[in-house]
Amino acid sequence: PHAELAQKGGNKSDFANHVSEPDLFYSDEEGPTVFETGHFQKGSEKRTHFLNFNRNAYHQPTSCRPRLLISGKPEYGQASHLAPAVIHALEKFPVYALDLSILFGVSSKTPEETCAQLICEAKRTAPSLIYIPNIHIW
């Protein structure tokens, strides 16, 4: 649903409450403080309701979860044909590559730190793709 939502260019549906696309993937760490947004003021005219039961999860997804894993024997063409085609079709989203050269390329970090940093960055920019070529030989 995330890919369809982004590729349609943000078509709005006829629901009572519209949620903008950045609100779907909101994290407290990324947003402004209460003082920057002005929500600390009493009596603001524009109030938003925290709970809204009119939201349709298909058209307005609320979370990002891994959706696709391409796997198989090496000679089936996952790395040479299928994965590049999927990445091209989803070129609107950020792509993070994770392979051995990236894990061991930076000598100041452990491979675990590099992997954790890449996954955190992918979560921060969700929806995104994590491409792990040749994982079968790890």
Image (cartoon, grey):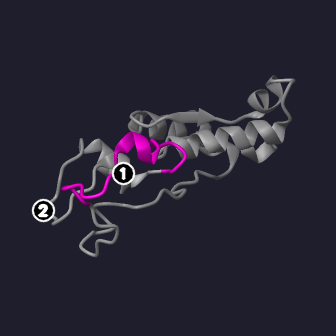
Amino acid type of the residue tagged 1 in the rendering: Asp
Task: Give residue 67's position: percent from left, percent from top.
Answer: 51, 57
Q: Earlier in the sequence, mark 1 or mark 2?
A: 2
**Secondary structure found at label 2:** loop
- How far apart marks 1 and 2 lie (CA) works out to 18 Å
**Comparing labels 1 and 2, the label whose residue is closer to the camera:** 1
- Quarter occupied by residue 138: top right
Crowdedness near tag 1: few (<14), some (14–19) or many (≥20) residues, C-alpha within 10 Å = few
What secondary structure prevails in the magenta region? Answer: loop
Residue projecting furthest to the left: 14
Left or right of 60: which side holds 118?
right
What residue would you read off at disc 1? 23
Residue 53 % position (x, y)? 28, 76
Q: Which quarter of the picture shows residue 91?
A: top left
Q: Residue furthest bottom?
A: 53
State the mark number for residue 14: 2
Start-end of magenta stretch? 27-47
User: Which residue corresponds to the image point at 51% horizontal and 51% vertical from the top-left?
Assistant: 28
